[in-house]
């Protein structure tokens, strides 16, 4: 008989059973019935006959070792302390598979699990599995730090302190444990498992330093870098509240927080804390100050004020409250004098002197409107504004303000009056009426609206001068007559 055939036969005889999710797991060609290695992780869906001699040898050795352990466990109801402690390692190895079914199968048919981070007692296979569906996402691996074992007739207990290292985050979490084991169907199973947080941490608070509090920002910032709104939203506590920088709507649940970051992440933001002030309480901490974001999509840098309040939830620090707001002085009106408003014309006039239509078009705001002197077409974007100046600059115009009237508002200003152009190409002089409305955009004053028109009297004839004094006298006389009547 060939070696591979011999091993295949032995594999069939000694298939693993103690950790099978429901049905017996043995050697099979079915993808739904994988062979389990010593760590109870799937080797693959191939049959033992298809495996290499090395793989088969390892499988045989691991299977024989496990079957030997099972035979000892089945030999009566006696068990020693070393074997009781080894039952924890079986459970811990089941955690390492990442399969909640395998973990749940370590519990007896009528178990009672009082888990560390759930108020709900788990009293059957499905509810135990449900708990580990979530817990295994943290990739926990445990070790016993301090334990006491009792052995009775057909039962054993192990109680003490264990510590978990969460592979998903690197966090370490201590807890108290009690395992009660019973012999069921010839195998020792967990009949009762009670796990609880360390009570002094509840009373005294989870220890954290100021530097560690500041480091929590990096977890959030790294989540931003993934560009995955779900990962960012998962950094917030179950009842987290987000008051975002650029939305009036408070975000009070996972879905609404995720919704905000769907749009914000399009800017590819990465943050840096410029100033931080930390407060530490009992199982909570706060970091408040100033941060600055660099938007990878645009290169723009934006400062904001922040408040993060963190709570210790489900074994890790989460954001319970996040308030982000614009720098308030940035919303104050940009100071500008009348003389400075008039000088904004010189920036535009200087761009004309370059004879470069792009240089002129760049003096206009993003959503500018130009109503030009010699075109009926409103110019409402960069391309149209540039197009107008392609033709106008051929005249080599240079302007001078003859009469100016300035108005200053909240981050906007206006200059309206009469200007005159000298056309360098012909020597002609042309007067016109102008209105410039400027807005403060991206750190400089830009033209939001520019309306230029010809002097109307040159085409329509002189307009009658307003007889203001005569009108006033007539109005006074009319009102006086009404009073006498």
Image: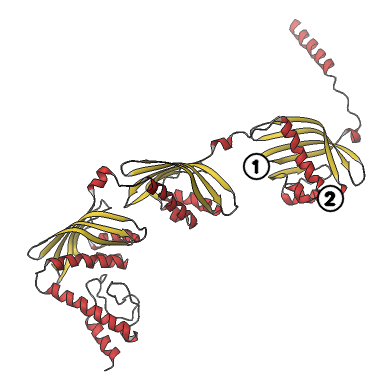
Residue under label 1, please give it: 441
Residue 485 in sight from this viewpoint: no
| The N terminus - image quarter | bottom left
Q: Quadrant of residue 97?
A: bottom left
Give whichever of 228, 174 is nearer the camera: 174
Which element type, helix, strand or loop, lies under badge 1?
strand
| The C terminus - image quarter | top right
Q: Quadrant of residue 474?
A: top right
Give whichever of 393, 228 is nearer the camera: 393
Q: Quadrant of residue 113?
A: bottom left
Which element type, helix, strand or loop, lies under badge 2?
helix
- Residue 443's x, y, as percent? 64, 42
Say the numbered circle drawn on residue 391.
2
For the residue carrying disc 1, how many other residues have a C-alpha within 10 Å: few (<14), some (14-19), or many (20+)?
some
Give whichever of 110, 17 is nearer the camera: 17
Residue 393 as seen in the image, left or right of residue 297:
right
Which comes sooner in the sequence, label 1 or label 2?
2
Q: How is the image coloured?
A: secondary structure
CA separation, marks 1 and 2?
Answer: 27 Å
Q: In the displayed orientation, state which residue is furthest to the left.
A: 153
Give whichever of 485, 42 is nearer the camera: 42
Q: Nearer the viewer, mark 1 or mark 2?
A: 1
317 is higher (above) or lower (below) than 20 = above
Residue displayed at 54% across by 36% down = 328
Residue 50 as seen in the image, left or right of residue 1:
right
Give the total number of marks visible in the rendering.
2
- Residue 76's x, y, as percent? 9, 72
Residue displayed at 45% across by 49% down = 257
Q: In the displayed orientation, state which residue is furthest to the bottom.
A: 1
């Amino acid at each position: 008989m060939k070696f591979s055939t011999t091993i295949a036969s032995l594999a069939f005889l000694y298939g693993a059973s103690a950790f099978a999710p429901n049905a017996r797991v043995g050697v099979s060609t079915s993808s739904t019935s994988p062979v389990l290695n010593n760590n109870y992780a799937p080797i693959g869906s191939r049959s033992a006959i298809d495996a290499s001699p090395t793989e088969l040898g390892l499988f045989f050795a691991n299977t024989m070792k496990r079957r030997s352990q099972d035979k000892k466990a089945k030999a009566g109801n006696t068990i020693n302390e070393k074997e009781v402690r080894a039952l924890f390692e079986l459970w811990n190895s089941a955690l390492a598979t990442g399969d909640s079914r395998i973990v749940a199968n370590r519990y007896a048919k009528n178990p009672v699990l009082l888990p560390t981070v759930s108020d709900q007692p788990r009293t059957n296979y499905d509810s135990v599995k449900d708990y580990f569906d979530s817990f295994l996402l943290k990739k926990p691996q445990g070790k016993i730090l301090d334990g006491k074992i009792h052995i009775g007739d057909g039962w054993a207990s192990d109680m003490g302190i264990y510590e978990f290292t969460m592979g998903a985050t690197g966090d370490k979490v201590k807890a108290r444990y009690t395992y009660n084991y019973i012999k069921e169907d010839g195998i020792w199973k967990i009949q009762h498992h009670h796990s609880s947080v360390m009570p002094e941490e509840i009373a005294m608070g989870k220890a954290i330093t100021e530097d560690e509090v500041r480091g929590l920002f990096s977890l959030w910032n790294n989540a931003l870098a993934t560009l995955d709104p779900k990962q960012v939203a998962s950094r917030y506590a179950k009842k987290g509240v987000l008051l975002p920088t650029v939305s009036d709507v408070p975000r009070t649940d996972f879905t609404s927080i995720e919704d905000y970051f769907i749009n914000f992440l399009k800017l590819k933001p990465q943050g840096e804390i410029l100033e931080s002030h930390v407060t530490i309480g009992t199982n909570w901490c706060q970091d408040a100050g100033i941060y600055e974001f660099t938007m990878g999509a645009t290169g723009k840098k934006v400062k904001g004020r922040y408040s993060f309040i963190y709570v210790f939830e489900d074994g890790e620090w989460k954001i319970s409250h996040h308030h982000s707001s614009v720098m308030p002085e940035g919303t104050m009106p940009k100071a500008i004098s009348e003389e400075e408003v008039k000088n904004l014309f010189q920036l535009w006039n200087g761009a004309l002197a370059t004879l470069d239509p792009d240089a002129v078009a760049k003096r206009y705001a993003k959503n500018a409107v130009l109503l030009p002197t010699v075109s009926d077409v409103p110019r409402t974007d960069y391309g149209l504004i540039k197009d107008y100046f392609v033709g106008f600059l051929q005249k080599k115009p240079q302007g001078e303000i003859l009469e100016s009237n300035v108005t200053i508002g909240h981050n906007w200003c206006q200059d309206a009056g009469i200007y005159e152009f000298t056309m360098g190409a012909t020597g002609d002089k042309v007067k016109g009426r102008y209105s410039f409305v400027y807005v403060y955009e991206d750190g400089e004053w830009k033209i939001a609206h520019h309306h230029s028109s010809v002097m109307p009297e040159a085409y329509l004839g002189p307009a009658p001068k307003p007889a203001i004094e005569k009108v006033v006298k007539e109005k006074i006389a009319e009102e006086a007559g009404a009073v006498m009547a």
